Amino acid sequence: MSKTLQAIRGMNDILPADGALWLYLEDTARRIFEQYGYRFVRMPIVENTALFVRGIGEATDVVEKEMYTFEDGPSKEKESLTLRPEATAGIVRAAIEHNLTYERGQRVWTHGAMFRHERPQKGRYRQFYQLDVEALDFAGPDVDAEQIVLLARLWKELGLTDAVRLKINTIGDQNDRRAYRETLITYFSRYPEQLDDDSRRRLHRNPLRILDSKNPAMQTLIENAPRMLDHINPDARTHFEALQALLRQAGIDFEIDTRLVRGLDYYNRTVFEWVTDRLGAQGTVAGGGRYDGLFELLGGKSTPACGFAAGIERLILLLQERKTECSDAPAIYLVFQGDEVVAFAWRVAETLRNEGYALTLNAGGGNFKSQMKKADASGARIALILGDDEAHSRTITVKWLRDTDKTQHTGEQERVSAAELGRWLKAHGV
Ligand code: HAM
């Protein structure tokens, strides 16, 4: 026998037992995104490596060590391509390429697989899925607030409101950051012996990321560091205050976390994260912010924008922890036996599907007993049973398999005329 093959580490199979929960989450999100006027887009999974290097930033963890990059094409015209580690850069590339914001701003959303070569652990994978929402050519702070309110609604509908909390911050504009960077380098350089290896490496490349360090030994040093909030220009400050006012008006609780900087370089002004304590180290379920400079950085004209992404696996873990029930069981399982019954059974099945019922038709034959076992395992509420008797009398035996609305039918069975079946099912709440 040949050796069995397995999925790649950090890349997970989503199996039928979890399928319904994934679809419930995706459908709920889709409905809410549409309610807020966001329109669906889908971009390629593979892009030119330069897009991410320029867009996300050379000195970020994602670009420095987490990208799946490969050479493609004949030897003379080899191109460097990368599996997308996130969706924003691709969407902005497409918006520039198709002149999407020529007439007016665009609210768009997408979902799909992203790839980062991280060390896998609970809530952190190498192929993972995001829900991603972007408002292109909106200067805010109204859309910044809109996206946060939209997420609050998503948590509410998913029953996760008390599992997550919101952190916001402003990181000012590019010039503020440039000046703040120097301030931080000067500050941290005064305490070289207190910096860990990671931070020493980041000191000149990306000192803002030092503020993000989780190393307990560095917390006092970080707490005493100069704060970004004290180094931002008046416009950015007004923007941040207006965002807070809108959130208060919408009844959204938030915490200002002056150390929140996010891991991608394109952000300016508003940054936010929704975090949970229930997932250990991988506690950020959604994150985003404003990226007013990204269009220009990628060769487009200056276009303010704001967006976020939520990690689907992390939300699924929260839903599972909450024991959120989701079922994709059919309402009806149809068992049948006898050569003369086949056509009748198929006709009944298609007629009920025309009426909108989810119906699984037994496949592969078998005696009634084995078919009834499959009917039960399918999770259906009722089994329809067709044998020669039923075919001759144009009737169908209905057997209750489980009583989801507790009307005490389980185990009962009765004969119903085929012509009456649709009405009978409706009258019995199936
Ligand atoms: P991000 O913070 O890198 O932002 O990722 C957003 C979310 O994706 C995280 O909060 C987390 O829930 C999930 N996530 C990230 N990496 C992994 C992983 N390895 N395994 C499982 N889940 C993960 C972005 O990607 C930005 N593009 C968000 C954005 C959109 N900003 C503006 N527009």
Image (cartoon, helix red, strand yellow):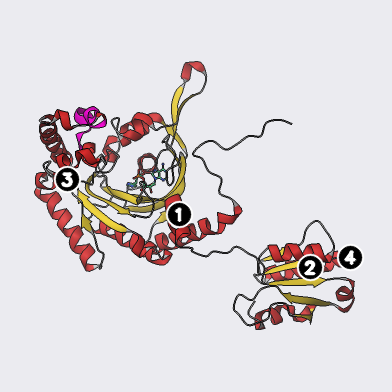
Q: Which residues are magenta?
A: 198-208
Q: Please state which amino acid type lies under the numbered disc 3.
A: Gly
Which quadrant is home to the N terminus?
A: top right
Specify which label sits upstream in the sequence, 3 or 4. 3
Drawn side of residue 158 relative to residue 332, left or right: left
Q: Please state which amino acid type lies under the numbered disc 2.
A: Arg
Discs 3/1, front: 1
Magenta residue check for 202: yes
- In the image, 84 versus 77, the foreground residue is 84
Decide: few, some or many residues near mark 2? Use Cα within 10 Å; few <14, some 14-19, many ≥20.
few
Label 4 C-beta lies within 8 Å of the nearest ligand 1 atom: no
- In the image, 300 versus 66, the foreground residue is 66
Q: CA distance from mark 4 to mark 1?
A: 46 Å
Specify which label sits upstream in the sequence, 2 or 1. 1
Q: Which residue is mark 1?
A: 317
Q: Which residue is mark 4?
A: 338
- The residue located at (73%, 80%) in the rendering is 412
Q: Which mark is residue 172?
A: 3
Which quadrant is home to the C terminus?
A: bottom right
